[in-house]
Amino acid sequence: MRLIFIAPPGAGKGTQSALITENYHLPQLSTGNLLRAEIKAGTPLGKSVADYINVGEFVPDEIMLQFLEDQITKDIYAKEGFILDGFPRTLYQAISLDRLFLKYNFKLDAVLILYVQKSELIKRLAARRTCLNCGASFHLEYKPPRVFNICDVCGSTLTQRKDDSEESIKTRIRNYNNLTMPIIEHYDSMNLIHRIDGVGTLDQVYARIDKVLKYLDKSGLSQ
Ligand code: AP5
């Protein structure tokens, strides 16, 4: 199965993708997590994207497209499929992704869109704590780690992402509204969209997503 997850910053793409991966064994391909790993490792790519990411601006399309092609052709994603979390973010990326799917003979099964209002996004992002080691994400109130400030998964200390500052959050939401929202129409014309209410507890939101995935399975759309 190959899915695309589209949602504004803080809506829960990462959190819900991790649950889908756990329950459906569908690998998560998060461009944000992968780019942060490059920054942490100090690679040339990491150095070239850090300034964009920290202030909440998009990484230029040309860099992202090459990066994504390198990822989706890796054995694990080519064989097992993926849930794409964080790509595409511009109409140019969406059209280029269509071409990549054609080139590699991949089928896109569905596009999931999570809807959450701005005030809730800000609440979720302001109290998010992230593990820089394994990428796991927590929330001080809604999803607290078992031990204060320590990652449940790998035991590293949790930190606040640089782009979770007030200024960067505003930029990210504005970029989503101006540059990412237009791609919804693109996928609407392909009849691939499933709209999901992203407000509610983590379990309530997951139950709505699960219903869509079961429908895709049952109707053979994911074969
Ligand atoms: P990325 O890492 O993808 O950031 P984002 O899109 O801003 O999304 P977030 O990771 O902030 O939010 P999320 O939706 O995953 O929410 P989460 O599950 O953590 O990208 C970072 C940057 O990389 C971009 O800004 C850009 O610079 C660059 N980039 C990446 N891809 C790119 C591309 N294709 N083109 C150009 N640039 C690119 O949840 C948020 C918080 O809420 C957590 O604390 C969580 O515990 C909590 N939460 C989740 N669900 C619920 C719930 N139902 N109720 C209460 N709390 C909840």
Image (cartoon, grey):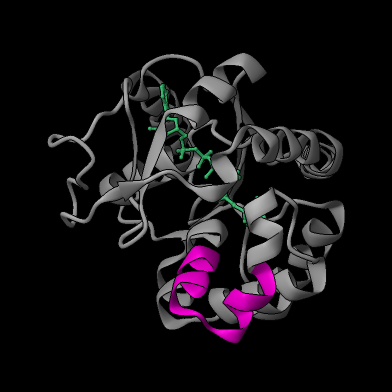
Which quarter is ligand 1 in? Answer: top right
User: How many numbered circles does the render carry?
Assistant: 0
Q: Position of residue 164 (x, y in %)?
A: 55, 40
Q: Position of residue 221 (x, y in %)?
A: 54, 47
Q: Position of residue 191 (x, y in %)?
A: 74, 39
Image quarter of residue 49: bottom right
**As displayed, is residue 12 above or below residue 28?**
above
Residue name at image x 61 percent, y 69 percent: 106
Q: Position of residue 107 (x, y in %)?
A: 62, 62
Residue 81 or residue 88, whichever sits in front: 88
Residue name at image x 44 percent, y 23 percent: 208
Residue name at image x 61 percent, y 85 percent: 44
Left or right, residue 21 beside residue 87: left
> What secondary structure is the magenta-colored segment mainly?
helix
**As displayed, is residue 124 above or below residue 38?**
above
Left or right, residue 34 beside residue 150: right
* Residue 151 forms part of the magenta stretch: no
Query: Which residues are the magenta region?
Result: 34-49
Q: Is residue 46 visible?
A: yes
**As displayed, is residue 3 above or below residue 77?**
above
Residue name at image x 68 percent, y 76 percent: 48
Residue 125 or residue 62, whichever sits in front: 125
Q: Is residue 105 visible?
A: no
